[in-house]
Amino acid sequence: MAGESNLVIDLMFLHCGSYELDRHSIHPGNCLSSDHALLSIDISIIEEVIQSSKLTIYPKSDQGTAFVEEVISSFKSLDTSIIDNSDKLESIVNQLGAIIDQAWKKNAKKSRMSKHSKQWWMDGCS
């Protein structure tokens, strides 16, 4: 409401590359009883989907061992003898990425994220 200076935030800090930085307005004609110009910023509020599960491979697990063995085996089968241009290099890098992705999806298990999902959590903490 006009005239209610308790609704004004004196300073706003925005990340330099933020979208909101370009969506602000300065209102020097609405200074009320102070010499501060009002600054308003339109910030979009969107519904965000928060994932409740993720794919995980636990250290020293059978799945972890299988993942590493599969990646090493697949890497060894790649022909890297002639990489003489950037297209061939890019192709090999893409193949490496696909190998890792496929091995991860094959060996990882879906785990549900909760407040106990941190590595430091142990049964003795509950």
Image: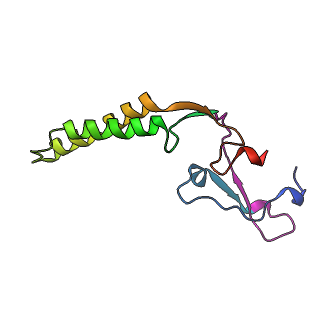
Judge whether residue 95 can be spotted in this image.
no
Q: Is residue 41 magenta?
A: yes
Position of residue 29 measured from the top left corner of the image (x, y, whole percent): 76, 61
Model colouring: rainbow
Report the residue at 68% width, 39% height from top. 45
User: In front here: 37 or 69?
Assistant: 69
> For this view, does 65 lie left or right of residue 109?
left
Q: Residue 53 falls in which quadrant of the image?
A: top right
User: In front here: 68 or 24?
Assistant: 68
| Magenta stretch: dominant secondary structure | loop
Report the residue at 31% width, 35% height from top. 99
Q: Is residue 99 above or below residue 24?
A: above
Q: Is residue 110 magenta?
A: no
Position of residue 90 measured from the top left corner of the image (x, y, whole percent): 22, 43
User: In front here: 62 or 32?
Assistant: 62
> For this view, does 74 lie left or right of residue 18?
left
Total marks in image: 0
> Among all residues in the image, which is located at the extreme bottom?
35
User: In front here: 89 or 53?
Assistant: 53
Judge whether residue 93 can be spotted in this image.
yes
Position of residue 63 measured from the top left corner of the image (x, y, whole percent): 46, 34
Report the residue at 64% width, 35% height from top. 50
> For this view, does 28 lie left or right of residue 96?
right
The boundaries of the magenta stretch are 29-50
Q: Residue 80 falls in which quadrant of the image?
A: top left
Report the residue at 42% width, 34% height from top. 104
- Where, quadrant-wise, is the C terminus in this rendering? top right
